[in-house]
Amino acid sequence: MDKIVIQGGNPLRGSVEISGAKNAALPIIAACLLTGGWHRLNRVPRLRDIHTIRRIMEKLGTVFRDQDNVLEVNSDNLFLHKAPYELVKTMRASILLLGPLLARYGRAEISLPGGCAIGARPVNLHLKALAAMGADITLDHGYINARAKRLKGAEIFFDIPTVTGTENIMMAAVTAHGRTLLKNAAKEPEIQDLAKMLRAMGADIEGDGTDSIVINGVDALAACEHTVIPDRIEAGTFMIAAAMTRGEVEVLGCRPDHLTGLMEKLASTGARIVPQGDRVTVKGPDPVESVDIKTMPYPGFPTDLQAQFMALMCIAKDWSMIRETVFENRFIHVSELRRMGAEIDINGNQALVKGKGELLSAPVMATDLRASASLLLAGLVAKGGNTEVQRIYHLDRGYEAIEKKFRELGAAIWREQT
Ligand code: UD1
């Protein structure tokens, strides 16, 4: 198993190119199940999660060709409709195969994703919506078994704006009979990217990016070419890293308009933020002002950047309050940050952080994807020796070549085998 070792103290300087968004690429690859022909997907990040969805789809009969960040996908000959437990347990987003498989083949069998480190994360809203569209859904031996001759359009209200739920139902609805109206839909940019791809395939979708999406079912779709949007969470992670190390970093190839929630908060810490076209320059503050944040569905402050921002608040000069409203148990990085000298009190979904101006190196353990990123950031500024981050397979799920990118910005960071 690999670990990452960081010798903290170097301010990050220079520029970094942002990869394609993992959370956009996953539903977009799943959408290739909706029709035959060769799809060509550009700017697909090379990540463990992408590899996982690919492995499941290969088991179903999908064929892939890839070169660098271009992925070609062909689902002409599917012979299986089942996503097995062994793979689904490593990536909850496998649930994204349910909608397209049901739409194209009228049946799907997907292992029910279990809970995960950051909460119970049920998929009840996905299933309720599919049932409203006429699917017959049963749970057998840990598997979701779904069948439908042809899904029919329906009016669906999501109790909670769910990102993968909205994506799953959009994919199910594109070839359904009639009109589907999604109310209280999620508004994340990744949903707009999926809608753009589906439109390129011939789908009739309007309203994506708002909480009300209308999909008129069409009879046929065709393979298309699509370029995945830049990863706003990766971009945000580098922006926070620049601020933390009091460096100056130009984040290239990103979408500043997808990062407004973060940019506003970073500016309040005293960082200088200059968005321009497809880049944002971040100059770190000194000292770091404490700022309260509350995670919210898009366009609010993203839960996927909460752990990284908390690391920044640990080196601020005062108290800050971090409220997590999206997931019920997303503070597991706190105990690891405490090992690095952080002072954080948790009360329910609120974390009170006492900024101490510094963090100290320590051996720490990554617990989930974004928690691992926060530990890396903490390591970049930690004083008193090297920080070792174990279990970094979490990190490899969602960050492309992260230690190489940090090294190119001047960080002393490397990977070792344990
Ligand atoms: C997606 C992202 C993840 C991000 C999250 C919130 C992908 C692959 N993952 O996850 O990185 O952290 O959005 O921005 O895109 N819920 C239910 N029932 C459901 C579905 C969701 O109660 O059927 C709840 C969840 O437990 C959570 C909230 O709704 O509390 C939002 O979750 P959701 O938007 O569905 O997250 P994911 O799509 O799993």
Image (cartoon, rainbow, N blue to C red):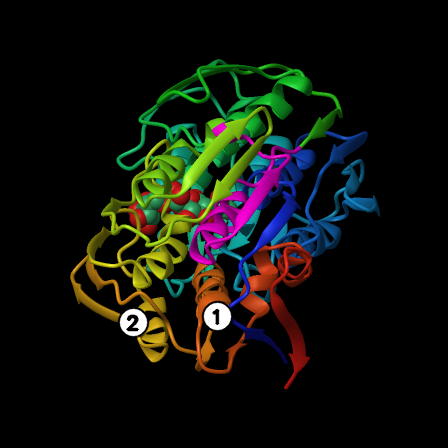
Please tell me which residue is depicted at 49% across the width and 42% down the height of the picture: 282
Q: Residues within 10 Å of mark 2 (few under 14, many from 20)?
A: many
> Which residue is more in the foreground, 48 or 54?
48
| Residue denoted by label 1 | 379
- Indicate the amino acid at tag 2: Ala
Residue 230 among magenta residues: yes
Per the rendered image, the range of residues in magenta is: 228-256
Q: Quadrant of the C terminus?
A: bottom right
Q: Give the residue displayed 35% in from the left and 71% down from the top.
A: 337
Image position, residue 174 (x, y; %)? 56, 22
Based on the displayed image, in which of its 4 quarters is residue 391 positioned? Answer: bottom right
Q: Relative to 290, is 18 on the left or the right?
A: right
Residue 412 - label: none
Type of the residue with mark 1: Gly
Q: Is residue 141 visible?
A: no
In the image, residue 102 lies at what x, y percent?
A: 57, 36
Residue 272 visible in the displayed image: yes
Q: Which label belongs to residue 342? A: 2
